[in-house]
Amino acid sequence: MVKNFTRKDLSNKIFSKLGFSKNYSSTFIDNFFETLSNNISKTNKLKITNFGTFRVITKKERIGRNPKTKVDAKISQRKVIKFKAASFFKKKINNNEK
């Protein structure tokens, strides 16, 4: 069973590694993600060196199909966030698999 890594887990890591209080660590994580989401929504792109790039793209309207009922339905135009990992991050992941 795979366990998700949550904000609480992340703030506990900061607490244990850096020694900040749990309250401060939790506030730090919340502010970090709020800053990321605000910057992505303003600029439509956010690059974090050695981690990756988040980019907002617009998907066109299209026809989709409900797999259960096989009924066609219109899927409206929407914005989605794509992530492309940096080569450093990809190498780190692939080296840890061995």
Image: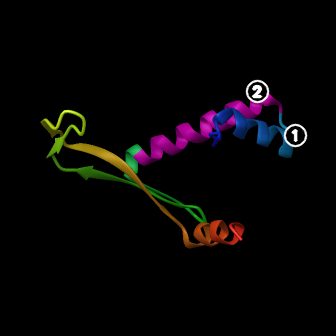
Please identify the quadrant where the N terminus is shown: top right
Q: Position of residue 94 (x, y in %)?
A: 63, 70
The residue located at (83%, 36%) in the rendering is: 20
The residue located at (69%, 72%) in the rendering is: 95
- Residue 30: quadrant of the picture: top right
Q: Position of residue 53 (x, y in %)?
A: 48, 60
The residue located at (65%, 35%) in the rendering is: 7
Task: Please tell me whether mark 1 sits on a helix, a strand or a loop.
Answer: loop
Residue that numbered label 1 is attached to: 19
- Residue 75: quadrant of the picture: top left
Residue that numbered label 2 is attached to: 23
- Label 2 packing within 10 angstroms: few (<14), some (14-19), many (20+): few
Front one among 61 and 15: 61
Q: Is residue 63 left or right of residue 52?
A: left
Q: Is residue 57 left or right of residue 52?
A: left
Please identify the quadrant where the C terminus is shown: bottom right
